[in-house]
């Protein structure tokens, strides 16, 4: 049986995809690996490049952009490894991350999901361990309390900025950019929820693994670089709205209607204050006007979407 199935969803990230596959091959030395690329109708010759450079890689070519969750599910269904690893196309392995992670999971049968330390391209740390969303940690993030008091656990229960990311730790959520999942756990919990087009599917999945009794473990001995946002930057407005959609759907799925309403209000007020903040900066900092114009447009876009998609009073 193959040890690890690496599933990579790609949408117009040709060069990053090539580097990702190359790093998977070079840094997986002790275990057998199959690589499955699910392409969401790219137009940058990604598929042709992969087939030419890596003929042993299985390529599944969708005729339209089906989203992150659905495309990953297509790849997972075609996989056969003892473990499945979701790998963003803009990920590059730093060391023998997969070998180290498989060894750790083999040694600890209670782990359902394992994630590595994630680094920025400049090798600085990405703080991506999370706790499950609550009204309190949502308020702290929306109000700015989490930024004002970054080292206080009570103010940063969501983003976990107080955690130095230097020890193995059980967490609630790990990012979907690089996740290793045990096949047995996957069989019990099921695939990603395809109602999430992009964003949110990872925290929903981790929550389901946790509720099923599987551990979600951050494993800093393994490291990867995440270039982050190489697909979403091609259509920034669309992906901003997709993130809002994902957050509201997650809240609707896992919380009661009153909590969803409070979450919507908190998010709306947060964007109103951000809009006001950027308008003030526009006048106070002439040198940064172009930046603030873009942010003002983004805030207005989000506010319009939130108002159009407000929860109905009778549903609360």
Image (cartoon, rainbow, N blue to C red):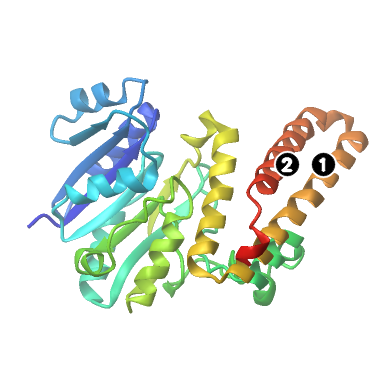
Q: CA distance from mark 2 to mark 1?
A: 9 Å
Q: Which of marks 1 and 2 precedes in the sequence?
A: 1
- The label shown at residue 278 is 1
Q: Quadrant of the C terminus?
A: bottom right
| Disc 1 packing (10 Å; few <14; some 14–19; many ≥20) | many
Q: What residue would you read off at disc 2?
A: 299
Q: Residue at x 60, y 64 (%)?
A: 315
Is 246 on the left-hand or right-hand side of 79?
A: right
Q: Is residue 143 above or below residue 25?
A: below
Total tally of numbered discs in the picture: 2
Q: Tell me where residue 118 sits by quadrant.
A: bottom left
Q: Position of residue 174 (x, y in %)?
A: 44, 62
The x and y percentages for residue 146 are 70, 65
What residue lies at 36% left-to-right and 48% top-to-bottom? 69
Residue beneath the point at 27% across and 44% down: 24
Query: Is residue 310 among the parts visible in the rendering?
Result: yes
Crowd band around label 2 with a 10 angstrom C-alpha radius: few (<14), some (14–19), many (20+): many
Q: Position of residue 239 (x, y in %)?
A: 54, 39
Q: Which residue sits at x=45%, y=56%?
A: 175
């Amino acid at each position: 049986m193959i040890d690890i199935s690496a599933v990579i969803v790609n949408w117009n990230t040709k060069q990053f995809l090539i580097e990702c596959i190359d790093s998977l091959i070079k840094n997986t030395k002790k275990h057998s690996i199959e690589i499955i690329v699910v392409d969401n109708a790219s137009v940058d010759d990604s598929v042709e490049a992969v087939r030419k450079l890596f003929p042993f890689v299985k390529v599944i070519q969708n005729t339209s952009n089906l989203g992150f969750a659905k495309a990953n599910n297509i790849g997972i269904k075609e996989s056969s490894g003892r473990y499945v690893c979701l790998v963003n196309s803009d990920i590059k392995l730093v060391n023998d991350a997969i070998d180290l992670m498989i060894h750790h999971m083999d040694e600890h049968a209670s782990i359902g999901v394992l994630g590595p330390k994630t680094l920025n391209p400049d090798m600085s740390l990405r703080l991506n361990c999370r706790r499950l969303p609550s009204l309190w940690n949502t308020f702290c993030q929306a109000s700015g309390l989490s930024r004002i008091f970054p080292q206080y656990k009570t103010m940063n229960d969501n983003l976990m900025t107080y955690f130095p990311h230097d020890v193995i730790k059980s967490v609630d959520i790990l990012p979907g950019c690089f996740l290793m999942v045990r096949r047995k756990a996957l069989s019990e919990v099921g695939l990603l929820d395809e109602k999430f087009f992009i964003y949110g599917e990872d925290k929903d999945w981790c929550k389901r693994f946790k509720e099923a009794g599987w551990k979600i473990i951050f494993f800093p001995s393994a490291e990867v670089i995440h270039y982050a946002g190489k697909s979403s930057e091609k259509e920034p407005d669309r992906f901003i709205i997709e993130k809002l959609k994902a957050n509201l759907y997650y809240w609707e799925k896992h919380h009661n209607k009153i909590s969803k309403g409070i979450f919507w209000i908190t998010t709306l007020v947060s964007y109103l204050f951000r809009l006001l903040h950027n308008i003030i900066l526009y006048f106070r900092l002439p040198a940064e006007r172009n930046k603030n114009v873009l942010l003002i447009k983004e805030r207005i876009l989000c506010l319009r979407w939130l108002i159009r998609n407000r929860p109905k009073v009778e549903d609360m």
